[in-house]
Image (tube, helix red, strand yellow):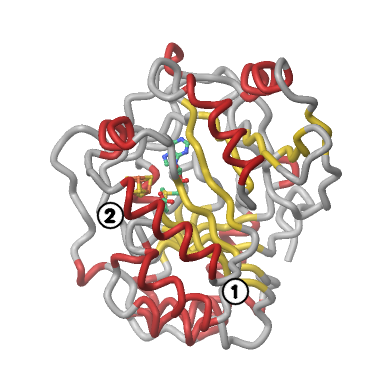
Amino acid sequence: MTDSYCRVINYLRLSVTDRCNLRCIYCMPDRALDFIPHSEVLTYEEILRIVRLCIQLGIRKVRLTGGEPLVRKGFIGFINRLCRIEGLKEVSLTTNGVLLRGLAAYIRECGISRINVSLDSLRPERFFYITGRDYFARVWEGLEEAEGLGFSPIKINVVVMKGINDDEVLDFVNLALNTSYCVRFIEFMPLGQNGWTPERFVSIDEIYQLIQSKWDLIPIKSGPYDGPALRFRIGGTQGEIGLIGALSNPFCPRCNRLRLTSEGHLRGCLFSDQEVDLKTPLRQGKGDDYILRLIEFAIRNKPKDHGLLGYGPQGSLREMYSIGG
Ligand code: SAM
Ligand code: SF4
């Protein structure tokens, strides 16, 4: 189905939980967190029903996210069922990698081969500072296990923050050169009370200039539904990096996404708090036609753009962990 701006909406980002085993400084605010009560989180059965209905309206790709999706009980059984739904062309996963070691083989067996792993520092002590947990080694082992099992592509997501990890950009480029991982540098986005300030912001243009001073970046032509990253090959190598400029280079005109929060709200835009509640009618016993009309409504009312070109902290009231990144 297309939205009011002729964008084909075929991609659902699905948050299965708002809980997490890390406390990243840019994602979770520094206060007591109000997690969604378990009874308000969609059951796996409810999620599967919504996915089947979304497929009727043209959704073909699903990415599982959170919070940290791997912390939710029964996750492997759930993805096993999700991956078997007829009409879905691709299921992928975004994870912080902490629980990947040990679960990667099951995830692969279910049929997921595309994973994004978030890793904002290659230095264990800095990883601890950014995430509040001493789990660098676990993430690293999880990545190695995933590589050994043939996951492809494995993308590493790095949120670049001035004065925190921007001095590691070239180290991450080296990682892309020495492994099969595709490293993607992401602009720090203002969401809720996540500590975003203009002083902490590093644009993808700055990152590009820094890398280009050392390496020749050769643009890779992307397809119409390749996602928001500008992709580059590094010099004459097989290494690849991506630049995601949500603020400085918005992807809105090509945005093909819907988001489902863990409490069952559909969002047309990460930065807009306009949400359509699917859980209440589901639990009231409403039929498929009723829910389909609500999903259509969410698609039709998808905002034209995120309206953040002034780069202000006026984005969503909710932080990323509670929406589903
Ligand atoms: N817990 C998983 C993880 O970290 O990969 C999945 C959920 S997390 C919210 C999804 C992605 O959002 C991660 O790559 C994370 O780095 C990114 N993210 C969270 N807050 C962000 C922010 N304020 N700006 C940019 N990216 C952010
Ligand atoms: Fe957790 Fe991911 Fe948010 Fe970090 S970015 S706190 S790992 S949900």
Among the 4 quarters of the image, the one containing residue 273: top left
Q: Residue at x 73, y 20 (%)?
A: 212
In the displayed structure image, the side of residue 307 where residue 251 appears, left or right:
right
Crowdedness near tag 1: few (<14), some (14–19) or many (≥20) residues, C-alpha within 10 Å? many
Tag on residue 54? Answer: 1
Percent coordinates x, y for residue 67 in the rendering? 34, 55
Q: Residue at x 67, y 22 (%)?
A: 211
Among the 4 quarters of the image, the one containing residue 289: bottom right
Q: Above or below — where is 169 with respect to 34?
A: above
Q: Residue at x 78, y 39 (%)?
A: 233
Percent coordinates x, y for residue 38 in the rendering? 20, 68
Percent coordinates x, y for residue 308 in the rendering? 56, 26
Q: Nearer the viewer, residue 22 or 304?
A: 22
Circle nearer the N terminus (1, 2): 2
Q: Amino acid at mark 1?
A: Cys
Q: Above or below — where is 261 with respect to 156?
A: below
Among the 4 quarters of the image, the one containing residue 172: top right
Q: Above or below — where is 155 with respect to 76?
A: above
Q: Nearer the viewer, residue 245 or 157?
A: 157
Which element type, helix, strand or loop, lies under badge 2?
Answer: loop
Q: Residue at x 80, y 32 (%)?
A: 235
Q: Amino acid at mark 2?
A: Cys
For label 2, the residue is 20
Q: Single out the residue that lies furthest toward the left.
A: 32
Q: Nearer the viewer, residue 172 or 64?
A: 172
Callout 2: CB less than 8 Å from ligand 2: yes
Which element type, helix, strand or loop, lies under badge 1?
Answer: helix
Q: What distance separates the C-alpha of mark 1 from that of mark 2?
A: 26 Å
